[in-house]
Image (cartoon, rainbow, N blue to C red):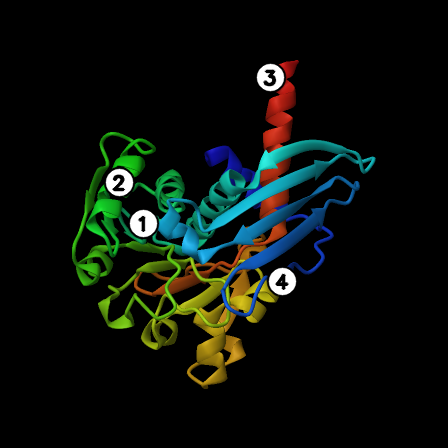
Amino acid sequence: MPDLIESLRKAFRTEYVVPPRQVTALSPETARLFVSMPAFDHEGAGMVKLATLFPENQDRGLPNIQAAIVVFSTTGTPVALLDGTVVTHLRTGAASALASSYLSRPDSSALGIVGTGALAPTMAQAHCAARPIRRISVWGRRSDRASTTVAAIRSRVNAEVDVRACDSLEQVVKSADIVSCATSSASPLVHGKWLKPGAFVDLVGSFSPSTREADDDVVRRSRIFVDTFEGALSEAGDLLDPLARGIIDRSRIEGQLADLVRGLKGRTHDDEIILFKSVGTAIEDLAAAQMIVAASSARRR
């Protein structure tokens, strides 16, 4: 994870060819989606991620999002096929941790995980790689899934980190220096009145205009950053809805990951509340895929 975070830091300092992602609704009766996400570097090497979103999979014991990644060499030759679901989890966590390295307080020690889906353990692992986390509180709608998530997180973080499930979402948020929310909720879960001074709010679950994980008060109280302006301003319901209703204006969205890694933006004092909204970008997938392929090639040698 630390290596992947650094790979993303380098990637966001680099220029890439990133065509707009294509999102196709598979039927009017369901929320099923098919997504295609390509990206190429300046030498011509690249990848395309093909992903499906089937919301009902949660009841089947399967991930809501599943994907495959095809990696291309500088000659345009397909050289690898990767499990895109695993890569998506890894790069999403790494992107949030990268943002946290600029936007959360350096002494952040309490992490709140909101949501118990497949992404939750990786989010915890990533945030622990970026900050000195000593306590992780996990909230989910179902206690059995929360217990499973706690066990999965414990397997990925230092044994000294206290990881436990919590029945009260309000208490999780109130006690957290970093709140990481990875859910498929259509309505807000995190309330701004619960946030303590200096909190960093990491929203990664929703990536459509009709979904929200945080209420208007979170948006109103926070300095706001995104992974990319292009993606967030077309897909992030947590921002698009408040923008449309005049709760905030466009000027409140201060910067994107490229600005952070270039030193143009960042936290300015300990008490400010900062929101990072991520909808994912193929830049992250390309950086992760190229790192994995390079590591695999090195082992074979």
- Identify the element where label 2 is drawn: helix
Instruction: Name above or below for residue 10 compared with residue 139.
Output: above
Instruction: Name above or below for residue 185 compared with residue 290.
Output: below
Nearer the camera: disc 4 or disc 3 = 4
Q: Are marks 4 and 1 in contact (CB under 8 Å)?
A: no
Q: Residues within 10 Å of mark 3 (few under 14, many from 20)?
A: few
Name the amino acid, label 2: Thr
Q: Is residue 292 left or right of residue 99?
A: right
Judging by the rendered image, the residue that carries numbered circle 3 is 299
Q: Are marks 2 and 1 in contact (CB under 8 Å)?
A: yes
Judging by the rendered image, the residue that carries numbered circle 1 is 116
Give x and y (percent) for residue 30. Answer: 49, 65
Give x and y (percent) for residue 156. Answer: 34, 33
Q: Quadrant of residue 248?
A: bottom left
Sequence-first disc among 4 and 2: 4
Sequence-first disc among 3 and 2: 2
Q: Residues within 10 Å of mark 4 (few under 14, many from 20)?
A: few
Mark 4–mark 2 distance (CA, rounded to whole Å): 33 Å
Name the amino acid, label 4: Thr
Nearer the camera: disc 4 or disc 2 = 4
- Residue at position x 61%, y 23% in the image: 296
Mark 4–mark 1 distance (CA, rounded to whole Å): 27 Å
Judging by the rendered image, the residue that carries numbered circle 2 is 148
Sequence-first disc among 2 and 1: 1
Check the image and name the residue furthest to the right. Answer: 75
In front here: 195 or 69? Answer: 69
User: What label sits on residue 24 in the rendered view?
Assistant: 4
Q: Is residue 10 visible?
A: no
Mark 4–mark 3 distance (CA, rounded to whole Å): 38 Å
Nearer the camera: disc 3 or disc 2 = 2
Give x and y (percent) for residue 86. Answer: 50, 39
